[in-house]
Structure formats: structure tokens, C-alpha cells
Image (tube, rainbow, N blue to C red):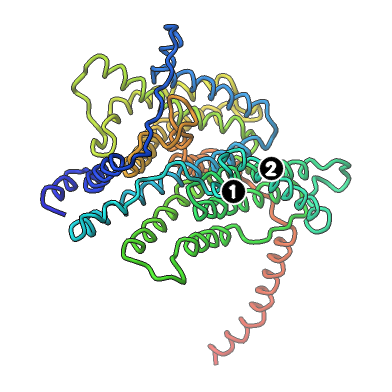
Amino acid sequence: MDDTRYESVVRGQLTADVDEDVHRIEQQLKAQTATYVPHKEQQVSRHKLLRMVQTSNVCQRIISGVILGTAVTVYLVLGPQSAPIYLCSFVVSVCNYEYAWIAERITHRFKTAYLEENLSASHPASSCSIRPFDGLRRAVTPISFGYPRLTAGLLSSIIAGLCTFFVLYLNLHHWHYKSSADAVFSYSVLDLVLFIGVTTWLTCFCAFLTPSPRCMLNVFFQQIAYALVTVTNYYCFHFDNVCYAPIETSHGRWLALVLILMNRLPLCRRITPSDAIESFVRILLDTVGFAYIVLLMQPISDLLIQVDGAPRIALGFLAVVWGTDTGAYVVGQVLKNMKYRGLHPLAHHISPNKDLEGTLGGVALGLGAIILVDALMPLPSDLTPEIIHLQRISRLLFAVVGGLISRYGDLFASLLKRMAGVKDTGALIPGHGGLLDRVDALLFVGAIFALYHRCAFAPYYDYYIDAYYENSLVTTQNLIARMTEYWIPIVTSTISS
């Protein structure tokens, strides 16, 4: 790397060397490739209102936010008791899919920069062997016959159906999940079957549409690690069940990390330096992705499992995160249209559009959102006025702290997108990008929110001590008492003599 590019990296352009090389190579390859066909331009409507919706990012963002926020609110309020669990599982599956594409782009950019740096100098014609990034291939492409999404949907339906029947068979003969001994219809069994069926279908569908078979396996490993913890915590602790846990939840996380490592190591073949760099970058990114999505989503999912009133808690949490994000965006747009030049960027080298003024505006809107949730969904009536007052103050404090922490989630997602050379993580939500663009702040605030809730609402986390554990404590105390009665006279007599 020469001095000029080193200076640009020191000034904060984290991927300046990669950006320059990859951009130049992609332009050369596109010029040399005769089969390159540009995308069609979007058909814009002649109607002024429709044209504004199609072309204005602000309009798309507002419309999508209203529709998405309303749908999530209705689902949490009117849905079943396990509605937050299904929602968290949906978020994990889709975010794993979007992160797989982000990681694939980052790996391709660094590998391409390495090849350009080391091969083109000695072999000028070798740049023709460097392939541009293929954003059309999927893990299911070899068997899709030109219809990857349709094929992924069919295969996912078959696998989800087989898994559902397999779970029913295991529950009848081995697991024996039940709500109570006298219940004719077991709600927990129905909930378990729906969770397995829906989660399996969505996980398989997302995994089949990832860039490669190895990415597909990683999505499976990560979702299994997440679902194992969720099933154990929800169906073993929430219901009065005779519960079967195949593996400890912490062991499941370590097992997923080991499988991810084994999946990415280039075993049983000779590798070049570029392959070694690619394997190292992939292992690093897959580990970061597992911690970023699965391990950061787990605390908020466990919290919603363990306490009563999960829909209300989830709405309050989402109000802080989404209110802060929306407020920061609106304040930023207003100040930009006013041509205000005194903005204080948070990290200009990562995301020039995130500034201190927008953050403060987002925190203000997050405070308003949590006050609105408190007004629409009051606290339980069995609490005293003093406790209700203290809890309201604690929620307002969390709205401020959580709003500030959420900006770190935004900046981390912006760093990943900058390294990947993309504007959004996907195109699922018009005006917002992918789902990971919407929940990046939520993932960072989730762990802090779980800790806050345990401290602010400590009485909700009281557990009854198991009878077996009580008996073991009594037995241990009796044993200690007998040993004390036996050994104290012996020790006393020995010392006196």
C-alpha cells in the first residue's frame, strides 16, 4: 500500500484501499464483458402523487413505517401469548439472510483487492480471471431451473412439514410436552408445533436464498442455536411441563460456533494465499454475525418469555428504538433542508448523515413514544402508586439511555454496509432498506434493556424454589450440623490438651 492510500486509511476511510481497487476492476470487467446488460429503469407513474411516492425516499419511509408499526402493534396486542417469540424468530431468520449477503460482499471486495495488488503487477492479464461479484446466484440455484424463490418455497414447505410431523411423533412417544395433566387439549403442544413449523419454513427459505451452500449451512447452525435456547426457555419454564432438554443452552451456542468454524475451514485441499485470506475473513465475519444477531437478540427474547405482559413490554421497547431512529431521521432532514451548517457528526468516516443534533431529536421523540405507550397500555393495577411512579421514571431514563445507545447500533450497521459497498442491507422495506436496517439499533439496545428490566422490575423475576432443591438444602444443612456437633468436641479437646 503506498503512502497516499495509507494516509487515507489513517484519516478514517476504513476501506479506501479496497474501494479503489474493486471499483476499478469491476469497471474494467464490465467493459470487457459483452453479456453485461444494465437493469431497466423504473417505470414512473404520470400521476403526481404516485410519482412522489415512487421517487421520494421520505414518503416511502413514512408510509412503510406507519404500515409496519401498525402491523407489529396489532400483532403484539391481539396475537397469542407467544406472539413476541414468533416475531423474534422471524427477525433472526431474515437478518441472518441479509447478513450472509453483506458478509459475502465484504469477502469478495477484500479478496479482489488482494488479487489486484499481488497478481496484476506481475501478470497484467491476470485481472481478467478476477470475477465480478455475482449477486444473482443462490444456494438453491443448481436445482432451481431458473426459479430460485419458487424452488426455495417448495423445498421449505416439504422440510417444514416433515419437521412438524417428526416433532408430533417425538412429543407423543418421548418428549410429552403438556399444559396440565387433566387438559384434553394441550395449548403448549399446539404452540410448539406452530413454532417449529413456521420457524423451519422461514429459516429454510432464507437459507436457500443465501449466496452459497456454506452460507446456507451457517444460517441453519445459527437458527438452531437460537431456537434451542428459545424452546428450552419457553416450553420448559413458561408452562408446567414434563420437559425434555436435549442439550444445555450455553453448550448449544458453543456447538454452533464450532460448526461455523468447521464449515469455513478449507480442509482436505491445497489452498493459495488468497484462499487463506478468504477463509479467515469469512470465519471472522460469520463469528461476528452470530454474536451480532443471535446472541444480541437472545436477551430480549428471553425477557419476553419470562415475564407477564410481554406485548406491552415489547411495544415500549420498540417505541424507544424506532422513535429514536425516526426522530433522528426527521430532525436530520429538517436541518438539511434549512441548510444548517453547524452539525456535529458522530462518525463522519463511517456515516456522514448521523450527527449529534439528530441524535438529540431522536431521544426526544423516543421519550414521547414511551409516554404514549404508557398512556395507551397502563401498568398492572396491583402495584402501589409509589411503585408505578418509580417505574415510570425508570422507563423515561431508559428512553434517554437506550436512545443514545441505539446510535451505536446504527453506526455498526453503517460500518458493515460501508465495507460491503452497499447503501442498504436489502430491499424488503421500501424507504428503509432491509430488515437489518430497521433492527440494527434494536439488537444493540436489547441486551441493555434486558438488564434494565431485571433491575427496575425485580419482583417479576421471583422464582419458587424447586422442592427437590429445598430437600437437598435441608439435607446439606443437617449433614453440616451433625458434622459440627461431632467435630467441635474433638477439636476443643485436642486444643485444650
Give x and y (percent) for residue 31. Answer: 28, 39
The residue located at (21%, 59%) in the rendering is 123
Vertically, is 186 above or below 492? above
Quarter of the rendering occupied by the N terminus:
bottom left
* Label 2 with label 1: CB-CB less than 8 Å: no
Q: Quadrant of residue 356?
A: top left
**Which numbered mark, 2 or 1, is in the foreground of this view?**
1
Residue topped by disc 1: 143
How many marks do you count on the picture?
A: 2
x, y (%) of residue 276?
35, 64
Kindly tell me whether residue 390 is visible in this rendering.
no
Going by the numbered disc 2, the residue's amino acid type is Ser
**Res 278 seen here:** yes
Residue position for label 2 = 157
The image position of residue 400, as x and y in percent, is: 39, 31
- Give the amino acid type for the residue marked by disc 1 in the picture: Ile
Q: Quadrant of the C terminus?
A: bottom right
Q: Quadrant of residue 11?
A: top left
Query: What distance separates the C-alpha of mark 2 from that of mark 1?
Result: 16 Å
Disc 2 residue crowd, few under 14, some 14–19, many 20+, Cα 10 Å: some
